[in-house]
Image (cartoon, grey):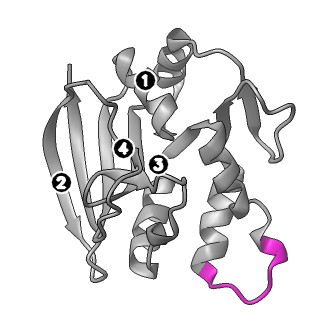
Amino acid sequence: MGLLIYSMLVSVDGYVSRSDRSFDWADPDDETLAFITERMHGVGTYLYGRRYYETMTNWANLRTVPGLKPLDYEFSDLWNATPKWVYTKTLAAASTDKTTLIRDFNPEAIRELKASSDKHVTVEGTQIAELCFDAELIDGVSIYQVPISTGGGVPFMPADAQIDLDLKDVHRFASGIVNLRYDVRY
């Protein structure tokens, strides 16, 4: 059985992007990207909201871009090889392979996915994560805390919700980014 892990890059003041949805500050260095890429080997499916999916599609065609680092190609290859469920009411078609567009949130479908998977499932995107928290689907949280304060924006955790977490691991990177891994207590 796979676990559902909520994972994103987050500012020290708890935001995944600024109010204008920009997150140019959230570009991981090579050490952090290598760590994230290693963890991707254990992921069997990504759950995305439309906005985050559209951001991630930049990884879809990296093999056509010459001169990038081998790590960028490895991340791209893993991302392209992994199935993606995209929750959207507005996208007419997926722009990447192995992508299923889902119109309505169905917690039972995610429970079945977790139960049938031998790998983890990740949720990336704040709105879909909030729905997953509300349905008590998320088993763990993996925060890549970036040493910057954005002063506001889109919060990582749902507003008006108390979510109890148990710290399981801390990994520090030379860049100042810190990975905090938690189990969720319901």
Gap in angstroms between the C-alphas marked 2 and 1:
22 Å
Residue plotted at (16% across, 47% down):
168
Between 47 and 9, the residue placed more toward the observer is 9
Residue 186 location in percent, x, y?
Answer: 20, 19
Specify which label sits upstream in the sequence, 1 or 4: 1
Image-based side of 96 in relation to 122, left or right: right
Viewer-side label of 2, 1: 1
Secondary structure beneath label 4? loop
Which residue matches tag 2? Answer: 169
Which residue matches tag 1? Answer: 132
Between 52 and 98, the residue placed more toward the observer is 52
Other residues around mark 3 within 10 Å, as few (<14) / some (14–19) / many (≥20): some
Gap in angstroms between the C-alphas marked 4 and 2:
19 Å
Q: Is residue 46 above or below residue 32?
A: above
Viewer-side label of 1, 3: 1
**Toward which corner of the image does residue 133 lie, by quadrant?**
top left
Which residue matches tag 4? Answer: 156
Gap in angstroms between the C-alphas marked 1 and 3:
20 Å
Is residue 118 in view from this perspective?
no
| Highlighted range, magenta | 63-70
Image-based side of 59 in relation to 121, left or right: right
Main SS class of the magenta portion in the image: loop
